[in-house]
Image (cartoon, rainbow, N blue to C red):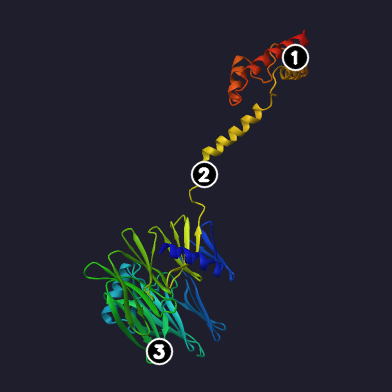
Amino acid sequence: MIAVGIACSLLLAPARGIDITYRDGAFFMSDPQGRRKVLIDPPAAHKEVFALKHRNTWMVWDTRGLTVRTGDKVSSSRFPFIPTSPKVLSKEQILETINKLDQGVRQREASGLSGAQLVGDMVYFLVRWEEGDGRPWLEVLISVDTAAADPKPVFAAKMPGTTRAKGEVSDDLALVGKKLACFQTLTGRWGISSFDPGDSATLFAPYGTNLVGATISEDGAKVLFAEKTGYGTVIAGSLDVAGGSRTQFAETRGKVSFVAANPGVVRIDEGKQSTLINADTGAMVEVPSESSARMTGLGLLTWSPKSAPTRARLLEPSRWVPVATWAGKAEPNPEPPVPSESKAVTAAKPTAATKPAPSGKPTAKVSAAALAAEAAKAKPTATGKSPTKPTPKSEPGPATTAKKPPATAKATEKPKKKTKAKPEVEVSVRRRGG
C-alpha cells in the first residue's frame, strides 16, 4: 500500500502541477491557477463587524450593537429591554433574571450576534445574551423590514435553545428551505431549532444527548457531532439539517476533533494512532500523531510536526489519494563533517611540501641566497645593524625551528635537506654583514 501511495503521488502531482514550499511558518501551494498560502498557526478568526445593505437600508452589528440607517435616520441598540420583556420570558424567568442582574451574573445588553439571514426583504438577526462565565442563556430573533417606510428592529421570536456561538459576531444561523435553522442545545439535549417566517412558529427537534463537540458547515446544511455514550465511548457522526437524518461513522475511546465541516473531516486520536475520516465517503487514512491538517481549495494539507514541519502531504479528501508532497530542509545530513575538514588539511600540506626541488645542494644555495637578500633588505630599515639570527618569522628561538617540521609532516622524504639549508643561510648572512 505504501508503494502504491508513493507511485500515485508521483503520478498525480505533475499532472495537476502543484508545487509545495514552506517558509516562515506558512506553506505555499502553487498551481496553474495561482498561489495559495496556508499558515500553520493562524490567528483565531473572530469577526467584529457584520454589515449588510438591502434596498436603501444599511444594517451593521458592531460594539454599538445593531445600527440601522435609512437616509438620515440612524438608530443603534444592544436591546437592554429584551431580558425582562414579557414578550420574551415568563414571569418566573423574569424574576430570576432580575435577581441575576442585581448579582452581576447577567447583563441587560446583548453579548453578541450569533448569525444573520436575509429572507425576501426581511433581515433576521440572532442576538445572544451570555452568563458571567460566557455560557449563552438567551437567544432571540430580531427582524428589520427593509421594505417599510421607516425600517426599525422588531422582536420576532425567542429561540428554544442556545447555540455554541462565541465572540462579537458569529455565523450560526442558516436558511434551510423557507425556514431559519440553527444547531442548539436545550436541557441536556442537542438538535435543530427552526423558525418559520410565515407563522413565526419555533420548533426544537432533538437528535441526541451528552454532546462533546460539534461543527457546522458554512451553509448550515450539515452538522458534524461527537457525543458520549453511557459506556465510555465517543460516537462521531453527521446530521443533515434539511432532511433531519443522523449518520454515525465512528465509535472510539479516543479523542474526536473536527478538521473541516465541508467536506466533513473528523480526526480520531487513540493511543499512538491518529486517523482522518471523511464523513461523506467513510474513507480513512492514518497520519502521524504529531501532525496537523487544514482544508484548502486544492485538498487537505497535512504536515508534521505541528509547529516545525519537516514533511507535508496534499491529499484528495474523498479517497485520500496523495496529490503532492513536500520534504523539508530539516532532514539529517548524510555527509559527516570530518572528511571535509581532513580533505582541506591534506590539500594544503602537499602544496607547501612540493615547493623544494628534488635535488639537494643547488636548491639550498638558491634558497639561501634569496633569504639572505631579503634579510639584507629588511634589516637596515629596522636597525641598520647586522642581524644575529636570520629567521624569516618574528618568532625567535629554537622552538620555532622545532615546530616547522611537523607543519610539513607529510613531506618526510628528505627531512635532512631542510636542516642543512638553515646553517647555510646563517653563514651567508653573516658574511654579507661582516
What is the secondary structure assignment of the residue under circle 3?
A: loop
**Amino acid at circle 2:** Glu
Is 371 displayed left or right of 133 in the figure? Answer: right
Could you say which disc has been placed on residue 335 in the image?
2
Return the x and y of residue 373 as percentages of the image width and height. 77, 18
Residue 43 seen in the current view: no
Q: How far apart are labels 3 and 1 at the CA level?
A: 110 Å
Label 2 crowding class (10 Å Cα cut-off): few <14, some 14-19, many 20+?
few
Could you say which disc has been placed on residue 383 in the image?
1
Residue shown at the point (62%, 32%) measured from the top left: 348
Which image quadrant is residue 189 in? bottom left
Front-most of 217 and 7? 7
Q: How far apart are labels 3 and 2 at the CA level?
A: 72 Å
Front-most of 331 and 359? 359
Residue shown at the point (37%, 92%) measured from the top left: 199
Q: Earlier in the sequence, mark 1 or mark 2?
A: 2
Residue 311 seen in the current view: yes
What is the secondary structure assignment of the residue under circle 2?
A: loop
Q: Residue at label 3?
A: 197
Label 3 crowding class (10 Å Cα cut-off): few <14, some 14-19, many 20+?
some
What is the secondary structure assignment of the residue under circle 1?
A: loop
